[in-house]
């Protein structure tokens, strides 16, 4: 009996520790992935059929807004043209010109950058100077190349359209980027200047996350070295906390972008190129600084 208790008690303690650890871990995932709303939306979508796979026709001309993303060559981004079309057939634009000139348009310009072009990549494909910094290289390259001719609204998003695993950070019931941009409140973007497309604070903005391990004092000063706002690199300015909802999907107005000179964006891109930090880590640094770059408080 004593031997049984001697082994049973440690085993029970181990089970309790593992169970508590798993509970904490899955509770975080449950919250971050918005699992309840996703499950309910998926059930509804299955029962009544999806409207997202068959988007309504967009009658009208291209609006003064652009969707910008980075992709590797193997990623299929056809969903952008299908779900966020740039324009309708010329015949429809001609026949319905009077009507379409007076209706709210929902069409988007597209800037899709291939970060790892191959020998077979068409010459018309947008590419980045280097495959580093995850999406940041494409984001900054677009701003630099179009600084003098920016659309009124810029939306920076990832190349995966939707899905519980790949697009968990997209805040719509089915984690769908098409749905997110169709429902984006453009007037609010214009009023606020910068809008994170993720409303869930977890991860990135909760109190426990604000001592951001990616944004050290040294990294902050290095990123903003030579910036037009000289105070950014001063010791007294470096914030004690940095908080932003993940995961580098956001919209900004042209006016907010232009509050910084072109040289700032060139400097940021050069930092990505020069930093000894890896592709993933340099991209993660900017993921938690986009809101600061575009004029918002550190938290």
Image (tube, grey):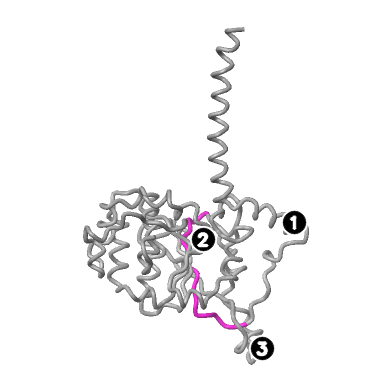
Report the residue at 56% width, 69% height from top.
Answer: 181
Name which residue lies at 49% across and 63% down. Answer: 157
Residue at the outermost bottom position: 98
Q: Which residues are magenta?
A: 60-74
Q: Is residue 140 above or below residue 73?
A: below
Q: What residue does disc 2 label?
A: 198
Residue 174 visible within the image: yes
Q: Nearer the viewer, mark 2 or mark 1?
A: 2
Q: Earlier in the sequence, mark 2 or mark 1?
A: 1
Tag 1 and tag 3, C-beta contact below 8 Å: no
**Around disc 1, counting alpha carbons within 10 Å, would you say few (fewer than 14), some (14 to 19), or many (20 or more)?**
few
* Residue 67 x, y percent position in the rendering: 50, 69
User: Could you say which quadrant of the image residue 14 lies in?
Assistant: top right
Mark on residue 96?
A: 3
Residue at mark 1: 46
- Which quarter of the figure is the N terminus placed in? top right
């Amino acid at each position: 009996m004593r031997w049984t208790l001697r082994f049973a008690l440690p085993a029970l303690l181990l089970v309790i520790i593992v169970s508590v650890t798993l509970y904490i871990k899955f509770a975080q995932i449950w919250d971050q992935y918005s699992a309840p709303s996703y499950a309910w939306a998926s059930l509804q979508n299955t029962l009544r059929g999806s409207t997202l796979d068959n988007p309504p026709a967009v009658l009208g001309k291209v609006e003064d807004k652009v969707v910008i993303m980075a992709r590797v060559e193997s990623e299929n981004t056809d969903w952008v043209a299908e779900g966020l079309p740039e324009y309708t057939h010329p015949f429809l634009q001609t026949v319905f010109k009077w009507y379409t000139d007076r209706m709210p348009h929902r069409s988007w310009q597209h800037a899709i950058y291939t970060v790892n072009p191959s020998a077979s990549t068409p010459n018309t494909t947008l590419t980045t100077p280097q495959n580093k910094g995850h999406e940041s290289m494409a984001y900054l390259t677009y701003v630099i190349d179009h600084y003098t001719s920016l659309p009124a609204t810029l939306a920076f998003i990832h190349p995966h359209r939707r899905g519980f695993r790949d697009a968990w950070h997209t805040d719509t019931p089915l984690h769908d980027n098409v749905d997110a941009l169709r429902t984006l409140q453009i007037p609010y973007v214009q009023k606020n200047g910068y809008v994170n497309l993720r409303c869930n604070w977890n991860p990135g903005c909760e109190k426990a996350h604000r001592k951001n391990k990616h944004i050290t004092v040294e990294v902050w000063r290095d990123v903003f070295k030579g910036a037009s706002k000289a105070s950014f690199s001063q010791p007294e300015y470096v914030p004690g906390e940095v908080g932003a909802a993940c995961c580098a999907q956001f919209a900004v107005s042209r006016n907010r972008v232009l509050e910084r000179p072109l040289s700032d964006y060139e400097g940021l891109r050069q930092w990505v190129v020069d930093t000894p930090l890896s592709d993933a880590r340099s991209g993660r640094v900017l993921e938690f600084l986009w809101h600061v770059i575009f004029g918002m408080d550190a938290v």
